[in-house]
Amino acid sequence: MRNRPIPGSSGLVREMTLLGDPVLHTPCAPVTDFGPELARLVEDMFATMYAANGVGLAANQVGVGLRVFVYDCPDDEDTRHLGHVVNPTLVEADGDEIRGPEGCLSLPGLEAPTTRFDRAVVEGVRLDGTPVRIEGTGFFARCLQHETDHLAGGVYADHVTGWRKSRLLRTIRKRPWGGGASVLEG
C-alpha cells in the first residue's frame, strides 16, 4: 500500500517553454524560498512531465527560472529513479562517453545523437532542505546531465556537432516554433 501521494497527482499541467524562449537560455537562479510555492512548482512539474511523456523536466521548461528539476527515469537496467532536486550541482560526470539519441520536451518531436558520460552524480537538496546525492548510470546519467544543462541555460542541441548539428538546425527551422534555431547557431 502506498503511504505517499503519487507525484504530480495534485499538480496542474503547465505550458511547455520552447526553444528560443529566453528563460531556456539563461542560467537559473538558486532557490531561496522553500515554502508552499516551491512545493506547488514541483507538483506541477511532475504533472507536466507526465502529461508530455517525459522522463525529466527542469523548471525553466515551464517558464520558471529557478534551479529545480524533477525526474522519473529508468537506468539501463530498467531500475526506476523518481524524485526531484532543488539547487542541483553536477559534481561528477565520468566513465565512457556514449553517443546516443537524446530528445527534449522543449524541442518537441526531435532527437539527435548526443554525447554524454555514462555516469553522473548530482548533489542538491529536497523540498524540505535536506541534502540529497543522486548517482546515475546509463540513460539515467544522461537524464541528470540533460536536466542540469537546462538549469545552466543550455539544451542538448548545444552538444550536437558537425553535420548532425546542421541537420538538426534545418529540422528545427521547419517547425512552427523553430524561430529559436538562431540561439543554437554561432
Image (tube, rainbow, N blue to C red):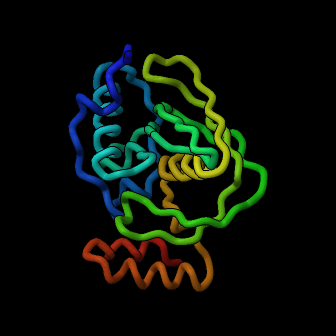
Residue 88 lies left or right of residue 135; in this view the side is: left
Residue 53 vs 102, above or below: the answer is above
Q: Residue furthest right?
A: 95
Residue beneath the point at 52% across and 71% down: 112
Residue beneath the point at 35% across and 51% down: 53
Residue 67 lies left or right of residue 35; in this view the side is: right
Q: Residue furthest front?
A: 1
Residue beneath the point at 41% across and 76% down: 182
Q: Position of residue 51 (x, y in %)?
A: 28, 47
**Of residues 145 and 65, which is closer to you in this image?**
145
Residue 99 vs 54, above or below: the answer is below
Residue 45 lies left or right of residue 57; in this view the side is: left
Quadrant of the image occupied by residue 163:
bottom right
Q: Position of residue 148 (x, y in %)?
A: 54, 46
**Of residues 160 and 5, which is closer to you in this image?**
5
Residue 170 vs 105, above or below: the answer is below
Quadrant of the image occupied by residue 37:
top left
Residue 14 lies left or right of residue 174; in this view the side is: left
The quadrant of the rendering that contains the N terminus is top left
Q: Position of residue 13 (x, y in %)?
A: 23, 43
Residue beneath the point at 31% across and 56% down: 17
